[in-house]
Amino acid sequence: MVHVIISGQVQGLGFRRFVRNKARELNVKGWVRNLPDRRVEAVLQGRTKDVEKMIEFCRKGSFLADVVDIQIKEIGDEEFEGFEITY
């Protein structure tokens, strides 16, 4: 399971929906949310190759997004039922 922080022009552009939809396509579990400092935070859990694909989707971003940086940190496991946008 990984914790990611995505920096750049990533809020107000449907970025969280983009991440949620891609995660559901790949059967990745976890959540995504906006941070007050205009970054986006997500937790991704699933098969290694699927999580790696999700990280690449986060690097590229949605159509209007401009991702400048992504920080990735391995974290302990927690069981998630699906993938949700949280607030």
Image (cartoon, grey):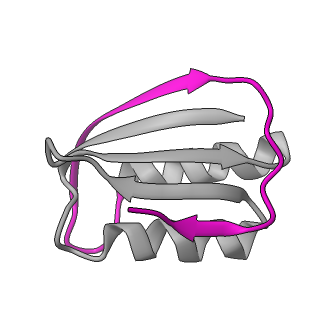
Quarter the N terminus occupies: top right
Q: Which residue sits at x=19%, y=62%? A: 11
- Camera-side residue of 13 and 63: 13
Q: Which residue sits at x=64%, y=51%? A: 53
**70 is within the stretch colored magenta:** yes
- Residue lying farthest to the front in this orientation: 87
**10 is within the stretch colored magenta:** no
Q: Which residue sits at x=67%, y=23%? A: 75
- Camera-side residue of 55 and 5: 5
Up the image or down, 78 lies above or below 22; here it is above
Task: Give the residues drawn in magenta, as a range.
Answer: 61-87
Q: Position of residue 32 (x, y in %)?
A: 47, 57
Left or right of residue 40: residue 53? right
Up the image or down, 73 lies above or below 2; here it is above
Quarter the C terminus occupies: bottom left
The quarter of the picture where residue 16 lies is bottom left
Total numbered badges shown on the rendered structure: 0
Q: Position of residue 3 (x, y in %)?
A: 55, 34
Left or right of residue 6: residue 8? left
The quarter of the picture where residue 83 lies is bottom right
Q: Position of residue 9 (x, y in %)?
A: 14, 55
Up the image or down, 57 lies above or below 8; here it is below
Q: Position of residue 54 (x, y in %)?
A: 60, 53
